[in-house]
Amino acid sequence: MLHKITPLNVLNATIILLFVALVVVLPSWHFMTPFTIWFMDGQRILELLLLSLVLMGGVSVKKSHSNNSIPILFNPKIRYALFILLALAIVSSVLAISPRHALIEVSTFAALCYLALYVAYLFCEHEAHFIKYFICALWASMLLFMITFYVVYAAAAVNRIPLIWPQPFIGFTNIRHFNQYQLWGLGLISLPLLYIEFKKHTRIFLQLVLAAWWAMLFYSASRGVLLAWGFGLVMTVAVYRKLAWPLVKLQLVQITAGFLAYYFLFKLLPAFLKLQLVTGTVMRETANDRLALWLQAINLVKESPLFGVGPMHFAWNYQISAHPHNSVLQVAAEFGLPAILIILAVAAYGIYCWINRFSAHNISTQSIKHKQLAVVLFFTIMASAAYSLVDGVIVMPISQVLMFTIFGLMIGHYCNRETKTTIDTSLQRSRFRPIFAVVVLLAMIWSTLPEIIRGLSGHEKGFSVGYTAAGPRFWREVK
């Protein structure tokens, strides 16, 4: 993918390697064990390192090099809306209780936008390789996590060791963070089965692996993921009709096989072996915790409707949780109503552009791979958007990286070589803005460095920001 050995190409290679390593090992490997750092904080450190390198790549890009330009699929009005959004975020941060901590959130999301553009650039320049390597990374990540999970399960069964839900999940402060990670890749890991003619035994093996992956979803007892998955499929069928049926049939086969595997592994087999295995269940009716969080967010919107209480400041105003488990209410409460209205308008415009470009009629003549990639990406963004309304999808480090990777893939696919002849000439091209990249990089370093220094020095609260609410937000809070 990189032809000449230059400082920029070395940096790009480093970014790609770190990105692949992050996707593959982050859920399973606690690389900061020697520092006695929380698993989640180690994941956040790697996210910050990746974003820092991406921003350095943005600084290094030469404007005269046309191959480094990255398509921005927004008309000028959308650009102005994004500039207004940035201004609102800065004002909200200045007015917040802790401006430095508010700036952590703003600089991180600005850096994540650079990551999305970087992924779009890689997709446009190296489409055939990039999508293959990314899906392989997702499969490797899934297999590595499953090996750890099922080895612990088997050891418990053999040695008659009780497993209390959510054991044997590891790597996540809360099991719902695993669900976020799982949902982002649920469509993409199925993509090869939609357009590659595997041998029969290979296809059966892949289906068995996916059934074991789905069994973990049922064992995690997430109502939100199942509802979001169903919503994503319904929306995909509504838009793509017959073109969606290969994905729908494959997903129905997987969810059926996954449920049967779950029932055998976590119900029948433990009963036969007399293994003490306490599981969660999706068949529960309580939702009072979410309602209380949403009401608190609405109250904060009423108190500060214009600029909100400040980015990442829900935690400073509520002692129960660090975020309201709803992306729309979270942004409205922390950034203000104008900010969330801009974001929703930009999102609606993006979906409109996508459906307009990748309608069932427009992609009917494309290759099977490009058809199914468009369908899978649409399903993924619909399902995860729905899940973000009941969980902290926009909060956790792995979820953030995967979310903006999907955004980048969608931008890249929108402008790939097979469809670029239909791109509207009014859409403009833009390059990384080196000056803005420097500002974002410095802001991110300045705002996160105090906690990093304190955490690595062995302070009793680690990377803790210090607000009163329990649970993780940017770092894991230790009380």
Image: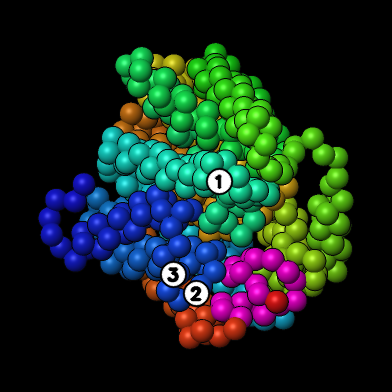
| Circle 1 or circle 2, nearest the eye | 1
Residue at 68% in and 42% down = 277
Q: Distance between the residues labelled 2 and 3?
A: 7 Å
Q: Is residue 87 left or right of residue 417?
A: right
Residue at 61% x, 48% y is 161
Q: Where is residue 401 in the image (x, y as percent from the top left)?
A: 48, 54
Placement of 5 over or under 275, stated as above or below: below
The kind of residue tagged 3 is Met
Q: Which residue is drawn at 46% across and 30% down?
A: 209
- Say which amino acid is labelled 2: Thr
Element type at mark 1: helix
Q: Which mark is residue 159?
A: 1
> Which residue is labeled 2 in the image?
36
SS for tag 2? Answer: loop
Q: Where is residue 356 in the image (x, y as percent from the top left)?
A: 53, 29
Looking at the image, which residue is at 48% across and 44% down?
151
Q: Which colour scheme is used?
A: rainbow
Disc 3 marks which residue? 32
Number of residues whose C-alpha sits closer than 10 Å to that of mark 1, classed few (under 14), some (14–19) or many (20 or more) = few
Task: Tell me, yes or no, whether the highlighted magenta stretch contains residue 465.
Answer: yes
* Residue 44 sits inside the magenta stretch: no
Query: Nearer the N terminus, badge 1 or badge 2?
Result: 2
Q: What element carries label 3?
A: loop
Residue 133 is drawn in which quadrant?
top left
Quarter-wise, where is residue 34 in the image?
A: bottom left
The part of the chain drawn in magenta is 461-478
Of the two numbered discs 3 and 1 in the rendering, the one whose residue sits closer to the viewer: 1
